[in-house]
Image (cartoon, rainbow, N blue to C red):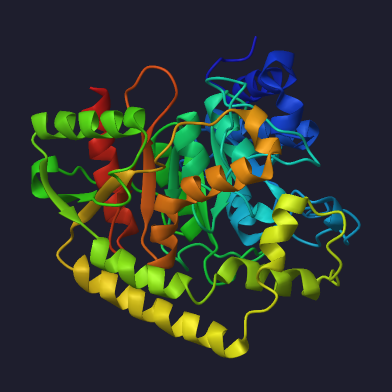
Amino acid sequence: MADPASSEARLEAALARIADPSLDGGTVMPQTFPAAARRAARAADRRAALGGTLGTLDGRIVAVKGLFDLAGEVTAAGSHVLRDQPAASADAVAVARLRAAGAVILGRTHMTEFAFSAVGVNPHDGDPGNPHDRSRICGGSSSGAAISVVDGMAEIALGSDTGGSIRIPSALCGAVGFKPTSGMVPTTGAFSLSSTLDVVGPLARNVADCAAADAVLRGLAPSALPSVALAEISFTIAHGRLLDDAEPAVRDAFLGAVDMLRAKGAVLRDGSIEAELDALAALDRIGVFTATELIATLAEKGLTDLTGVDPRTRARIEAGRDLAATDYVRMQRQRGALIARMDARLASGEVLLLPTVPILAAPLAGMGEPAEFHRVNAKLLRNTRVANLFDLPAISLPLPVRGLPVGMMLMGRRGDDGRLLAIAAAVERALTD
């Protein structure tokens, strides 16, 4: 019998979870590679038996979002209109780095079409339910990635985040999801929703696994997270529009966690980022990057006819067709000013705290109604997109609640990714001890 701690044994347990009909693994992870995964797991176990290792991810079971290239496979990015595209000639850089570190790539996970929705539903591939209540949404666009780690189908998942696509499903499903600063992890070989905003990052059950995966993805040597004392960190609770009208269950869970952190010695002050949000609203009045840049991505693939695209997604894409080139340039310049403004605001090392999303997971049944879908989608994106537009590293941590999960988001200064992960680990310990 295989050692239960071995990579092979853990892989077989993950495959059994995918095959469990009660978990809807065929929707969560519609493409699996069991033969290749078994070879990789055996190789990791052989290295371990000889006293060798490729690093902290050697033998770990990893799932990959459906927008990353895998050599020899078509990258459909959750859309039927891309399924006739040529197969990828090479792995995405992020996937190649995971393989080189000994990660066992088990399969590709469910995602929303083109990664252009935070809800987690996809009429082409099915709608996976939330692990805590299958009748509710799981969030997106890295929907299957979050479910896979929560439901034991993978230990770590690779996702992408353009407006919250890692952190939203993590918050709704009870996972940890990390969005790095732009440029820290190469996006080469990942389908591009927005070349301006896309980043690549990990989802897992804990901060340590996210940090280990982030180091591999960034091409860094593995190292343990430094220990951080909560009393040494300046936390700001961002009161205002992103917190005050959160659903009561979310607000209560968030403020309850704040009290727990205070009791553990954390220094938290009440504050706001309302002035910065006003500046962001001025950018939003010009246009949005996602729709315009997605149209360009699809055109590069020879796709100008959006027939066959989910009408809810198509409506949002079409809204970007008429953006003038001068307005696009204005948007880029204004975003540069936003980034500089927040850099100055957070220069002292301040860490911002917010609910990751202001609502609990909504019922799946309502997502067939376009008005309700768009209302929920906008709510889910409202808080998380701040980190993308200001280019901040951000992480969502599950809070200790009963019932549907609630996430707490920590946002740090641009480029301070390692420090934010260390702080998140300290917060995680304080909330779980």
Quarter of the image that includes the C terminus: top left
Residue displayed at 56% across by 83% down:
328
Between 166 and 313, the residue placed more toward the observer is 313
- Picture layout, residue 302 above or below residue 274: below
Q: Position of residue 8 (x, y in %)?
A: 64, 24
Can you tell which quarter of the image residue 120 is in?
A: top right
- Picture layout, residue 387 above or below residue 138: below
Q: Is residue 206 left or right of residue 328?
A: left
- Picture layout, residue 237 above or below residue 14: below
Which residue ends up furthest to the bottom in the rendered image? 326
Quarter of the image that includes the N terminus: top right
Q: Is residue 428 left or right of residue 49?
A: left
Which residue ends up furthest to the right in the rendered image? 84
- Visible residue check, residue 132: yes
- Visible residue check, residue 224: no
Q: Is residue 359 left or right of residue 261?
A: right
Can you tell which quarter of the image residue 404 is in?
A: top left
Q: Position of residue 271 (x, y in %)?
A: 15, 54
Between 203 and 197, the residue placed more toward the observer is 197
Circle count = 0
Between 12 and 385, the residue placed more toward the observer is 385
Residue displayed at 22% across by 28% down:
256
Q: Position of residue 58 (x, y in %)?
A: 54, 39
